[in-house]
Amino acid sequence: MAKVTLDYDVSEVSSQFEPLPAGQYLAEIVNPDDCQLTESQNGKAMIKIAWTIKEGEYEGRKIFDNVVLSVDWKVKQYCDIAGIESGSELDTEDFIGMEAIVEVVQREYQGEMRNNVKTLLQTS
């Protein structure tokens, strides 16, 4: 069994995770665990993606996105940023290390506010 010493007081940590303010954030898909091929609730192929904010007040925070592969406009955004050409095979590993400006919005879901990735933009 592994033992770990925590460097913070868990009694001071909120059990609620506040959504990020709506806005644009420089973010990166850091490692393979941040990009997983799975299925949506409707049984459609989907990629679950975790973006890590790279700078500013929210540096290190995660933004989650679910990309259903049948939603062509969303897939196009990811392919454009990753440089994946039309007609080529999509490999989730192509997204690892990818940076983008992630436009985040807030929406209510089952009575609580959550973040959604609205748009991906190329970095300069």
Image: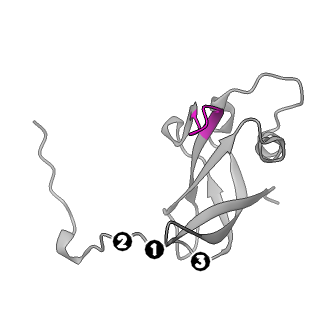
User: Residue at point 30% right, 74% down?
Assistant: 14
Residue 27 screen position, x and y as percent: 63, 58
Q: Is residue 4 above or below residue 16?
A: above
The circle drawn on residue 119 is none
Q: Residues within 10 Å of mark 2 (few under 14, many from 20)?
A: few
The circle drawn on residue 21 is 3
User: Residue at point 36% right, 71% down?
Assistant: 16
Q: Quadrant of residue 89?
A: top right
- In this rendering, would 107 be left or right of 16? right
Residue 9 seen = no
Residue 83 screen position, x and y as percent: 82, 38
Region rendered in magenta:
39-47
In front here: 117 or 28? 117
Residue 66 screen position, x and y as percent: 62, 47
Give the residue pinned by disc 1: 18
Q: CA distance from mark 1 to mark 2?
A: 6 Å
